[in-house]
Image (cartoon, rainbow, N blue to C red):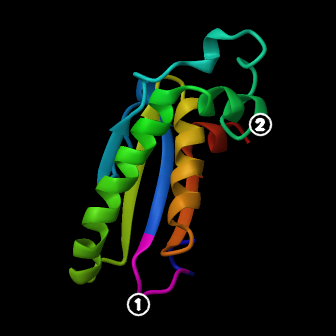
Amino acid sequence: DLVDANAASLTLVFESFAFKHGVPLDADFVFDVRVLPNPFYIRELRPLTGRDEPVAQYLEAQPEVGEMLAQIQAFLQRWIPNFEHDQRSYLTVAIGCTGGQHRSVYSTEWLARSFGDRNATLVRHRELDARD
């Protein structure tokens, strides 16, 4: 996917992962969302992922989730122009939680959508993609 991306602009790669399997080695920024409420502990949500609407609704109802995502978004908005000025072709933002299934997946999807109008974005879900 990176090869197909426009080389003249910065491509943002958002990747979810599980800390229990280690931090992605190619990450430029790593954010830890393990402090957020965990859908894993709700029986109905446990088998689902952050891509599923019930998990998204649960996380959206938690004020700290919105606050953390807004802070990550603001941080990236502030510093992305510097990476563009430095003529970087891509920037990898890794979002981790315990199992890489709920919080990090939802956060990765949310951030990719929030930057999709401004930058080319790619989304990877390390743990989910490994299951497919």
Q: How many other residues sit within 10 Å of disc 2, few (<14), some (14-19) or many (≥20)?
A: few
Image quadrant assignment for residue 89: bottom left
Q: Which residue is mark 1?
A: 8
Mark 1 vs 2, N-terminal side: 1
Picture coordinates of residue 61, whole percent (x, y): 62, 28
Q: Residue at x 42, y 46 (%)?
A: 70
Say whether residue 128 is magenta: no
- Cα gap from disc 1 to disc 2, whole angstroms: 35 Å
Mark 2 belongs to which amino acid?
Glu
Considering only vertical position in the picture, is 24 above or below 10? above
Choose between 3 and 55: the one closer to the eye.
Answer: 55
**Relative to residue 22, is residue 92 depicted above or below?**
below
Foreground: disc 1 or disc 2: 2
The C terminus sits in image quarter: top right
Residue under label 2, please give it: 53
- Between residue 99 and residue 107, name the one nearer to us: 107
| Horizontal and vertical percent position of residue 36 | 46, 23
| Badge 1 density bin: few <14, some 14–19, many ≥20, Cα 10 Å | few
